[in-house]
Image: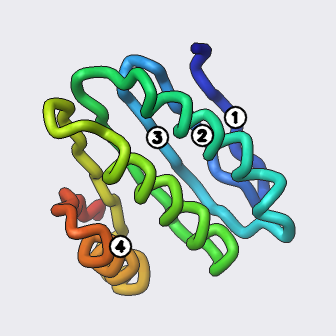
Amino acid sequence: MENYFKKSGNKTPEIDFNKNGSLKLKGRSIHEDPDEFFLAIIAWVENYCKSPADSTIVDIELEYFNSGSAKFILVILQLLTTQLKDDKRLVINWYYEHGDDDILERGQYYSSLLNKDFVFIRES
């Protein structure tokens, strides 16, 4: 299995998923066609879940994402929370800017939907 890296663009986030268990999404995600962008990422996560690292750390550092991206971000997090076995550690770090209640609330919503505690990290 190879690592998955995609450099950020004007409308796309940086994706840095490493088979060692470090998974990072960073930037803006405002795709016109999120299906095309996220399908390869979801396939990578499905493959990763078959033979994951002992510890998986997910860093979500999105300053903005649209509803199309929101759906796929949730799918990725659902895969990780449901497919990783109990003997594997999963930490989801959700970053948000001080005063950005929208991003914070989206993370809290995902956390409650997935019944998984997130680590909320406020950046100044």
Q: Position of residue 35 (x, y in %)?
A: 78, 60
Give the SS element for disc 2: strand
Q: Would you say 50 lies left or right of 92 here?
A: right
Task: Name the quadrant of the C terminus.
Answer: bottom left
Which percent across, then down, holds residue 44?
Answer: 60, 34
Give the mark nearer the N terminus: 4 vs 1.
Answer: 1
Q: Are marks 4 and 2 in contact (CB under 8 Å)?
A: no
Q: CB atoms at circles 1 and 2 under 8 Å apart?
A: yes
Residue drawn at x 77%, y 51% is: 37
| Residues marked 3 and 4 touching at CB (< 8 Å) | no
Mark 3 or mark 1: which comes first in sequence? Answer: 1
Query: Residue 110, which numbered label?
Result: 4
Given the image, on which type of amino acid does mark 1 rest? Lys
The local secondary structure at tag 4 comes to: helix
Residue sitting at 62 percent across and 46 percent down?
Answer: 42
Residue 24 has which mark? 3
